[in-house]
Amino acid sequence: MTQAPMRTVSRVADLIDQFDHLNPTRDLKELIEASGLPKSTVLRLATDLVNRGLLAINSKGYYSIGPAFLRWTRLAQEMWHVDEQTLNVLESLVRDLGETATLYVLQGRSRTAIASVDGTHAIRNVARLGEPLPLTRGASAIALLSGNLALIDSLKNAALLGEEESFDVDQLRTRAAQAAELGYSESQGEREADAASIAVPVRNQEGRVIAALSISGPISRFGSGVRDKALGRMIAASNVLSTNGIGPVGGLL
Amino acid sequence: MTQAPMRTVSRVADLIDQFDHLNPTRDLKELIEASGLPKSTVLRLATDLVNRGLLAINSKGYYSIGPAFLRWTRLAQEMWHVDEQTLNVLESLVRDLGETATLYVLQGRSRTAIASVDGTHAIRNVARLGEPLPLTRGASAIALLSGNLALIDSLKNAALLGEEESFDVDQLRTRAAQAAELGYSESQGEREADAASIAVPVRNQEGRVIAALSISGPISRFGSGVRDKALGRMIAASNVLSTNGIGPVGGLL
């Protein structure tokens, strides 16, 4: 039990990660190409995952997400569900600002969207719930780090070990410290070239930052006028969430 | 890449399998006990799973299903969803017979419930969707095997390799062949001591058995009178499903 099992966990996760709404089914060839692993390895992992119901294979040899997910999807939805009040806060932000409002939470060395309300414009940002995103890029990452500066060292160590993309540690620290002072963070084209975002931290009863509330959309709509209008609303919204909590999911954070 | 990675897939699946509605959170000690693995191994696997969002850990050290499952919630529900017509057939069976009606599909060397309508009695069978169950026990297993007799050899081989519980091959073959002839199967107390079940195969357009439709409840209510009443209805119901299909999920089978 040295590195091999850990690599296998990653490989298993990589295989499962190949399936989404755009790619609900995959054949063996696609899985091999996407994973870069030898055919025999992919076949063995996939067979084992099929036997556990984590993947399924149909009579034509196409793989898909397995029925075992039914077991956990309801559980995940109940646990990672924000309450009605929190959703109302997001909806009210979208009504006022027109841009997509999203709530991100810290998970290990990543951040994950657990709730999102789409903006009202045809061209808008659409958040993918549940997908682990980097903590080193984007306004929401900075807002989360602003209350968890010690995490930057853990990210740095992971990057040194090659487990994370490398990044400019000093710059990240400066930005997180600044966000802690100002109470918000901004980003333009960091994670996706055309997307801009403004984010504010959300705290739990003990004052610990557990989430980031963001609005995001195309860079072209995120001029300084928008920022000035948005910031007051967002800080007010985050205060409401910090005071009232965000529902049962808060207990998981 | 000999046996080790396969063991790891099983270990990963075992860890995730520890979480359900009765046990939404688990601490490290429980995970170690449940898995029988050394602490360091569980810790390493769990940490890797947390980094991929498949597990989450809160500030008190309790693990839960991770937010990454949100990514597949809609996908899994859409793919493994039977259509309205199929659900109506199950509901109508429950109205007529009072017992829980469930639709099982073949998955690898197991069967999995993908749709179920609860019986009307206070004491009733409740099917857990998405959970892989053995193909060697229970009326639904026999109904599925009745159209896939070749699978019995694969189950036998897996049992010889220690990957499956051993079972009486000849008895299983006899029962499956009999079910193929009669068009139904029965079981009493096979998978759970107090539960009885009657199951009929469901076919796809090409005539291949892709699912089993069962009714199940306490043994005390499954006398021969019930069977005689139930059988005609169930065979009629399975004919409807075999003719009309069970929805998009049929394409996965």
Image (tube, coloured by chain):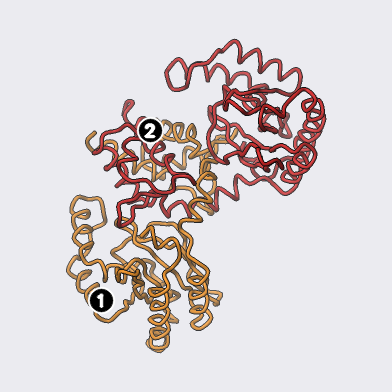
Chain colours: A red, B orange
The chain carrying label 1 is B
Residue at the image position 61 percent from the left and 39 percent from the top = A126
Observer-nearest of B230 and A103 = A103
What residue is shown with label 2? B41
Q: Is residue A119 left or right of residue A96?
A: left
Q: Is residue B110 above or below residue A50?
A: below
Residue at the image position 40 percent from the left and 82 percent from the top = B236
Q: Secondary structure at mark 2?
A: helix
Q: Is residue A175 above or below residue B156?
A: above
Q: Is residue B187 left or right of residue B247?
A: left
Q: Is residue A164 above or below residue A114?
A: above
- Image quadrant in which you'd find residue A8: top left
Quarter of the image that includes the N terminus of chain B: top left
Q: Secondary structure at mark 1?
A: helix
- Image quadrant in which you'd find residue A100: top right
Q: Position of residue A112 (x, y in %)?
A: 58, 35
Q: Is residue A18 left or right of residue B208?
A: right
User: What amino acid type is highlighted by mark number 2?
Assistant: Thr
Q: Position of residue A19 (x, y in %)?
A: 43, 44
Q: How many marks?
A: 2
Q: Residues at badges 2 and 1 in contact (C-beta under 8 Å)?
A: no
What residue is shown with label 1? B180
Q: Earlier in the sequence, mark 2 or mark 1?
A: 2
**Label 2: few (<14), some or many (≥20) within 10 Å?**
some
- Image quadrant in which you'd find residue A163: top left
Q: Is residue B166 left or right of residue A56?
A: left
Quarter of the image that includes the C terminus of chain B: bottom left
Residue at the image position 71 percent from the left and 34 percent from the top = A204
Q: Nearer the viewer, mark 2 or mark 1?
A: 1
Q: Position of residue A170 (x, y in %)?
A: 59, 10
User: What amino acid type is highlighted by mark number 1?
Assistant: Ala
The chain carrying label 2 is B
